[in-house]
Amino acid sequence: MYKRQPQLAVRGADVLVPRLARAERTAEADDTAPAWSRGTVLVTGATGALGGILARHLVTQHGARHLLLLSRRGIDAPGASELRDELTELGADVTVTAVDVVDRAALAEVITAIPADRPLSAVVHTAGVLEDGVLAQMTPEQLETVLRPKVDAAWNLHELTRDLDLEAFVLYSSVAGLLGTAGQSNYAAGNTFLDALAEHRRAQGLPGVSLAWGLWADTSSIAGHLAEADLRRLARAGLLPLNAKEAMELFDAAPGTGEAVLAVTRPCGAAASRCPCCAAWSAPRPSAPPLPRAPGPRPARRSPSGWPPCPRWSGAGR
């Protein structure tokens, strides 16, 4: 059985393999839910498709009243003024600012300018850029284009806010970093950094969660370039698109799991709502094919009662 596993971890007398396991809601889930209505919520990549979905969700479902929406083009980005007006009509005070989050000094200026009566209370980093290519032919420019909005931007956000009283620090990562996806080695590396940063913040007693998203049904710069053949290939690998409602249900469920890194996807057609997955190491079983990547040793979790098992990834227990 061990010969068929691409990765093994030896822990004492146990031989473990990487699996996706259903993350469970902790007993303290209600107490750990962020208060999105307190202070100002900063969202990067806010004028993109995923940022817009999140901003609407925070206002309509969580009563967020002060949003600072950042993007490189700001209000000049397509749909930015419409998004601002829509959120304003819903009762939110919305500021759309043009800033490259990679520019530490510019970002620091934006954060410092947040009014004292509505201090920064949460950060959600959704920004990301694709520049796919085969690893052997990857150029330094392709690496820089993808890594800077992930690595440099996230680290700037971390360092500039780590002394603030934040309710949440959420990083939009990708399953590319957990599973590996063809032609996206640079994107996988950038997202793996986000996963590690969330773990790093948790180790320092700071809020932090990295959401490794799978496919979104809503077209965006991240998934909209995929051809039908690409989508079929990913479906065969067990990744099916999430619609916006499913995605936001999982976004809300994530803090209640207590996990720093979560794979947020709908594997093999399973009902995704309320049941994100966490990467884990567990004893190998023939019924559970392994994942190529996992962020590190963590005990496997069982599915909580009432959540349907995930067909492809079931049987991942110790």
Image (spheres, grey):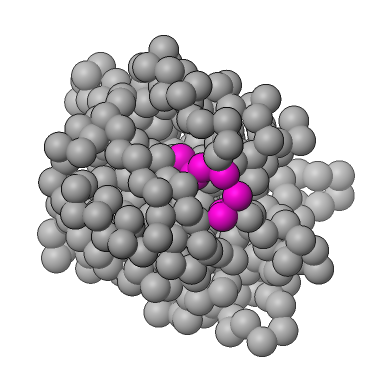
Q: Is residue 142 left or right of residue 275?
A: left
Who's the residue at 48% across and 68% down the image?
Answer: 61
x, y (%) of residue 111? 48, 26
Image quarter for residue 297? top right
- Observer-nearest residue: 39 or 294? 39
Residue 281 drawn in magenta: no
In the depicted structure, whether residue 287 falls above or below residue 291: below
Q: Is residue 288 visible?
A: no
Residue lying at the far top of the rendered structure = 105
Can you say which quadrant of the picture contains the C terminus? bottom right
Residue 38 drawn in magenta: yes
Residue lying at the far front of the rendered structure = 117
Q: Is residue 38 visible?
A: yes
x, y (%) of residue 121? 59, 41
- Observer-nearest residue: 172 or 241? 172
x, y (%) of residue 265? 44, 64
Magenta residues, start to end: 36-42
